[in-house]
Amino acid sequence: MKKSIYGLTLEQLTAFIVENGQKKFRAAQVWDWLYKKRVINFADMTNINKECLQLLDENFAIQTLEESVKQVSDDGTIKFLFKMQDGNLIETVLMKFPYGQSVCVTTQVGCNIGCSFCASGLLRKNRDLEAGEIVGQIMKVQEHLDNLGGGERVSHIVVMGIGEPFDNYTNLMNFLRVVNDQEGLSIGARHITVSTSGLTPKIREFAEEDIQINLAVSLHAPNNDLRSQIMKINKAYPIEKLMDAIDYYLEAKNRRITFEYILLDDVNDHVVEAEQLAKLLYNKRHLSYVNLIPYNPVDEHGQYQRSKSEAIKAFYETLKKRGINCGVRLEHGTDIDAACGQLRSKQIKKDKVKAN
């Protein structure tokens, strides 16, 4: 199987082309065809010489994803299930906001982090996605928008789909550099957010990168006992280590961090937890934002339910009174297997039934 050319940064593409005897300027031409004109066949690159086209075709594919299922929500959210060359399935979500079109991408097939409330982790990690497969999700969604004919483009990206992005760090960074490149898709760094469950060494490494991508941290509990119950990763990287890494990041970047907090009924949604959270974040409150997320119930995790509206309100107001910036996330696609990983899980079950 050929790898997708989308996995190469412009610098890497240039090096490949020069090392194989072609002129350096060809890389910029190919890049323009890929991301500005958005062709999906090398043969359509009409100003590229035959030798260069043959070189590219022998070594790379362009798009390596195939649309398997597309679900459209009443609110306009679209969830795509893509099949990769090896038959694995991944999910990508397009959400429409007043400020633009935002795409949530997947970085791994399955997930090993094992958060007890999450549908993504129902299926263990099979493999990491290559950078070209992550970029390919953006290009397939952009193809969908192009076909609508409205001239709309993907303007925002959240790396919050299936998998732990920092567990696939090299491919993640190549993806970010490709989509952020000003000569290509030119999606602004401030319009891209990467979410992590708390791999503290990678948070520190990310702080050293020369790219101003937004960071979100899945916190979900304000103390170690509770967080370890619902997020296994806390046993490896407890809150003290996590907060040290976050302080390091804030010192290096001076950029606001978003803390994701899923509200689970009668688990982590009491005023006492809100007060603990406010205390935990107080010394970094000027660079913190808490995103309160009403839980999307998942059949396989029946022990959890969505917090009651009164509890959500009380949690929010407690944080506000303690000086913590926060908001309650608007829901998108609740009628189309909105929980991350749910559509993939259901499709795999269907395929197994058919096979039997």
Image (cartoon, grey):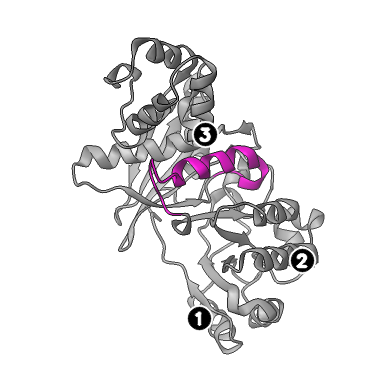
Q: What residue is rendered at 35% in x and 40% in y? A: 141
Would you say residue 116 sits in the magenta stretch?
no
Nearer mark to the viewer, of 3 and 1? 3
Q: Is residue 237 left or right of residue 284?
A: right
Residue identified by numbered label 3: 11
Residue identified by numbered label 2: 244
Residue type highlighted by circle 2? Asp
Q: What residue is rendered at 52% in x and 74% in y? A: 308
Residue type highlighted by circle 1? Lys
Q: Is residue 178 left or right of residue 266?
A: left
Kindly tell me whether residue 302 is visible in this rendering: yes
Query: Residue 320 at what x, y percent from top left?
Result: 55, 85
As drawn, the label of residue 72 is: none
Residue type highlighted by circle 3? Glu
Nearer mark to the viewer, of 1 and 2? 2
Looking at the rendering, the stretch of residues picked out in magenta corresponds to 162-188
185 lies above or below 96: above
As drawn, the label of residue 313 is: 1
Q: Which comes sooner in the sequence, label 3 or label 2?
A: 3
Query: Residue 120 at what x, y percent from top left?
Result: 58, 45
Query: Residue 220 at what x, y percent from top left?
Result: 64, 65
Q: Secondary structure at mark 1?
A: helix
